[in-house]
Image (cartoon, grey):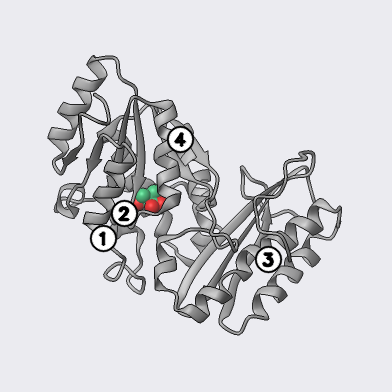
Amino acid sequence: MSAAEHFLVITQIAELRRVIAAARKDGHRIGCVPTMGALHAGHISLFARTRQLADVVVATIFVNPSQFAANEDLSRYPRPLEADLNACREAGVEIVFLPSVESLYPPAFDTWVKVEGLSATLEGEIRPDHFRGVATIVLKLFNIVQPDSACFGQKDFQQQALIRRMVRDLDVPVQIVTCPTIREADGLALSSRNAYLNPAERRAATVLSRGLRLAEVQLRGGNPDVAAVRENVRLLLAAESLVHPDYVAVVDPDSLAPLEQPQSRMAVLLAARVGSTRLIDNCLIDRHSSEPSTLVPGP
Ligand code: PAF
């Protein structure tokens, strides 16, 4: 199966299983990129990374209702299907899996996956059932696609940590690969939700990456007071009138446990409402690495 010859859009679970089984029989490695559509350059970079690991790239497009709370943006979540299919085709994706809500959540659906500790903190405190929905749908997609590898963006840092933990705990035979966040030239992390921002909010939203940059400079520079660094970032965010920070956290990148002292590897995670749009962003800090920052210069 090669990108040029094949581009399949499959809506039925049974058909997808048949096509994947045939590809596997031919010795092909399967790579999967789960998405909710509204594809942007971040997703395209995940397809490109998956291509390096697999012979057949499967993109799933499914706006998963169970990860949205009643007060969230499920109904207005962007669904530009035609543009998404074109983007997949151009990126060399072989198979797009486009299931219906009814096929993934049949009547009397009653089984949920909960990654206890990692889903209780940070985003989980603000969006209580969000990660139960994410873990459940990702495990279902893994069971259907049975990929050898699956790529996720670092942008959703807690999500990728939780999926790694789920895969380890439940012995799911898939390699999880986390790919760098793709940013606009001014530092804003790409997100399907950026489409909700009006021009003033879009300008204000750059403060998220500037906040991360501030934390990076201070923590790398050896500031021993993590609480002060967090507060400095929160103040920078709050100085933008359109921005309302939900949290600024400095955590261990694997356990997501909050840090009071700097350590060699740290993740800075933040979430803020920009107007009525909730955005998240993060950066990884390795104090022993001389790699340049992937964030914009600043603060
Ligand atoms: O990151 C996303 O787009 C979603 O949370 C995912 C992983 C596709 C599950 O619905």
Total count of labels? 4
* Secondary structure of residue under mark 3: helix
Q: Is residue 275 left or right of 214 when viewed as pictured?
A: left
Disc 2 vs disc 1: which is toward the camera?
A: 1
Tell me, for residue 211, which label it has, or none.
Answer: 3
Q: Is residue 267 left or right of residue 164?
A: right
Q: Which residue is depicted at the point 39% across and 31% down?
A: 51
Nearest to viewer (mark 3 / mark 1): 1
**Residue 49 image label:** 4
Q: Earlier in the sequence, mark 2 or mark 4?
A: 2
Q: Establish if 112 lies above or below 47.
A: below
> Farthest residue in the bottom direction?
241
Q: Residue at x 72, y 76 (%)?
A: 235
Spatial CA span between label 4 and label 3: 28 Å
3D distance between C-alphas at marks 2 and 3: 28 Å
Q: Which mark is residue 37?
A: 2
Q: Amino acid at mark 3?
A: Gly
The answer to whether the residues at label 1 and label 4 have Cβ atoms under 8 Å apart is no
Q: Which sits earlier in the primary sequence, circle 2 or circle 1? A: 2
Q: Residues within 10 Å of mark 3 (few under 14, many from 20)?
A: many
Amino acid residing under circle 4:
Arg
Alpha-carbon distance for marks 2 and 4? 18 Å
The answer to whether residue 40 is left or right of residue 102 is right
Residue 143's x, y, as percent? 29, 34
For label 4, count other residues whose C-alpha is less than 10 Å away and answer few (under 14), some (14-19) or many (20+): many
Mark with earlier residue (4, 3):
4
Label 2 with label 1: CB-CB less than 8 Å: yes
Q: Which residue is mark 1?
A: 80
User: Which amino acid lies under the numbered mark 1 shown in the image of this protein?
Assistant: Pro
Going from the N terminus, do you reach mark 2 or mark 3 first? Answer: 2
